[in-house]
Amino acid sequence: EPEVTQTPSHQVTQMGQEVILRCVPISNHLYFYWYRQILGQKVEFLVSFYNNEISEKSEIFDDQFSVERPDGSNFTLKIRSTKLEDSAMYFCASSVGGGWDAFFGQGTRLTVV
Amino acid sequence: AQKVTQAQTEISVVEKEDVTLDCVYETRDTTYYLFWYKQPPSGELVFLIRRNSFDEQNEISGRYSWNFQKSTSSFNFTITASQVVDSAVYFCALSEARNQGGKLIFGQGTELSVKP
């Protein structure tokens, strides 16, 4: 069964460092998303991406964040200068269309120290 | 404003009991989609169901059933004869059709603990 895969599963980084979280969406899906979940809290939308551009982004997704689909299969989230409060589980998701079933990867746990 | 409320933070039941998880949503859209996801202790988010706003038929899948009522803006989830493996956090989510990017708005989640 097709699935969304994310790497790494866990990343520890020092405050101020840049991190890149990687995702391989399901191959025939056209919409891609990043969400985050701070420990014990709800899942929050960060950004949606369609047709090689951002469709929508939340207030959380400030200038420190960027997304890219560099090669037609990978979808990446970059955080330029990490802060302690960026520590969270980051989920990638994909769907065939907006509003369709969104399937999530297993998540990347980011710890900023 | 779009919002999803799961008023039950934690529920604890004994195996084989039936349990209902409540979800109330707010939206100004006439076309929208409702979802349930399961987050087991391993942390991944598992898709369970999607309903669109024009389809109020209840859905049953094995021990799982969903009751969608537009009149009360609710999309409740019932597990019949619960099992220990059902222990997880369950999230209800909303996506509005006018939001063509497909953004999901999640509720706070309900942590279900099923004891043997």
Image (cartoon, helix red, strand yellow):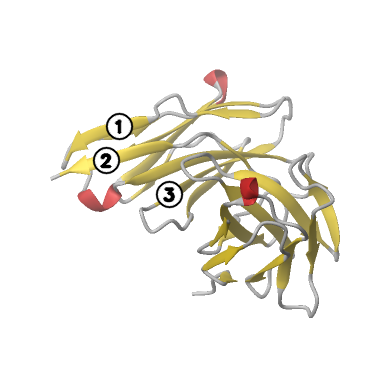
Q: Are marks 2 and 1 on the same chain?
A: yes
Q: CA distance from mark 2 to mark 1?
A: 6 Å
- Residue at image mark 3: B38
The chain under label 2 reads B
Q: Position of residue A11 (x, y in %)?
A: 56, 66
- Residue at image mark 2: B113
Q: Name the residue located 76 percent from the left edge and 57 percent from the top edge.
A: A81
Q: Residue furthest left?
A: B116
Asked if one can make out residue B79 in the rendered structure from this viewpoint, the answer is: no
Work out whether mark 1 precedes mark 3 in sequence or the reverse, and give the earlier one: 1
Quarter occupied by residue A12: bottom right
Q: Classify residue A95 as left or right of residue A79.
A: left
Q: Name the residue located 79 percent from the left edge and 71 percent from the top edge.
A: A69
Quarter occupied by residue A13: bottom right
Residues at discs 2 and 1 in contact (Cβ within 8 Å)? yes
Q: Are marks 1 and 3 on the same chain?
A: yes
**Local crowd at mark 1 within 10 Å, few (<14), some, or many (≥20)?**
some
Residue A8 vs residue B75, the one in the foreground: A8
Q: Position of residue A75 (x, y in %)?
A: 72, 69
- Residue at image mark 1: B11
Regarding mark 2 in the picture, which secondary structure is present there? strand
Work out whether mark 3 precedes mark 2 in sequence or the reverse, and give the earlier one: 3
* Amino acid type, callout 1: Ile
Q: Position of residue A3 (x, y in %)?
A: 54, 71
Q: Are marks 3 and 2 on the same chain?
A: yes
Q: Could you tell me which quadrant the C terminus of chain B lies in?
A: top left
**Local crowd at mark 2 within 10 Å, few (<14), some, or many (≥20)?**
many
Q: Name the residue located 42 percent from the left edge and 51 percent from the top edge.
A: B39
Regarding mark 3 in the picture, which secondary structure is present there? strand
Q: Residue furthest bottom?
A: A71
